[in-house]
Image: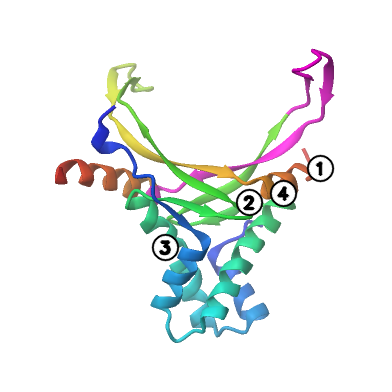
Amino acid sequence: MALTKAAMAEMLFNELGLNKREAKELVELFFEEVRDALAAGEDVKLSGFGNFTLRVKNERPGRNPKTGEEIPISARRVVTFRPGQKLKARVEAYAGSQ
Amino acid sequence: MNAIMMPSNRTVTKTELIESLARKQNHLAYKDVELAVKSLIEKMSLTLSVGERIEIRGFGSFSLHFRPPRIGRNPKTGDSVALAGKHVPHFKPGKELRERVNNGAAADMEAN
């Protein structure tokens, strides 16, 4: 089961004693803050987890995969996530079920 | 590259994020907001470390990608070293985040 905003709010309710409405609002606002910063052109650094950085991509030639028609992919700004050392180390240890 | 589309170098840190949240939720004590944000981040790390996904609608999803075992080299000696397979965290931005980030860049361009 994937971790969702609802499960995060539930955790804040159970472990921190925020009421359900506060917990839900805080989770919502947390992601909204990160999104606002990125939309405003700012990188976001969450120590212990990782950094969200913005990259600008130039226009490049593309193709409609259905028709094969050539169409340029316009220049755009995109978000990339770079996991921090601590997160990488914790995840690396996961043996997995593959 | 269009210089106007260059992202600014400004970076928002976890502490600044907590401060901003605390200002908006001023019915909560700063300490509680701080603890909540730290708990959220710890929960997200923990989730990934046990191989589970994170799915935040409108923001994006985090999952693990597997890097198969490979033969690496010690760059100093040139010796071959067997490297075990490992998992690495991966983030896929959601539609709303993608659009807002890209529209933010377009708005900057128009403003200039």
Q: Which residue is mark 3?
A: A33
Q: Which residue is mark 4?
A: B51
What x and y, as percent, mark residue A23? 53, 77
Task: Tell me which residue sits at (44%, 68%) in the image.
Answer: A29
Question: Does residue A97 appear left or right of residue A9 in this picture?
Answer: right
Task: Tell me which residue sits at (39%, 39%) in the image.
Answer: A78
Magenta stretch encompasses residue B111: no
Mark 2: which amino acid?
Arg
Q: Quadrant of residue B32?
A: bottom right
Mark 3: which amino acid?
Glu
Q: Tell me whether marks 2 and 3 sit on the same chain.
A: no
The part of the chain drawn in magenta is B68-97
What x and y, as percent, mark residue B85? 78, 31
What x and y, as percent, mark residue A47? 59, 55
Considering depth in this image, is A5 or A60 the residue closer to the camera? A60
The chain to which mark 4 is attached is B
Q: Tell me whether marks 3 and 4 sit on the same chain.
A: no
Q: Which residue is mark 2?
A: B53
The chain to which mark 1 is attached is A
Going from N to C along the chain, the mark reached first, 3 or 1, is 3
Label 2 secondary element: loop
Q: Which mark is residue A95?
A: 1
What x and y, as percent, mark residue B6? 31, 37
Q: Does residue B49 lie above or below B65 as drawn?
A: below
Mark 1: which amino acid?
Ala
In space, the residues marked 4 and 2 are separated at their CA atoms by: 7 Å
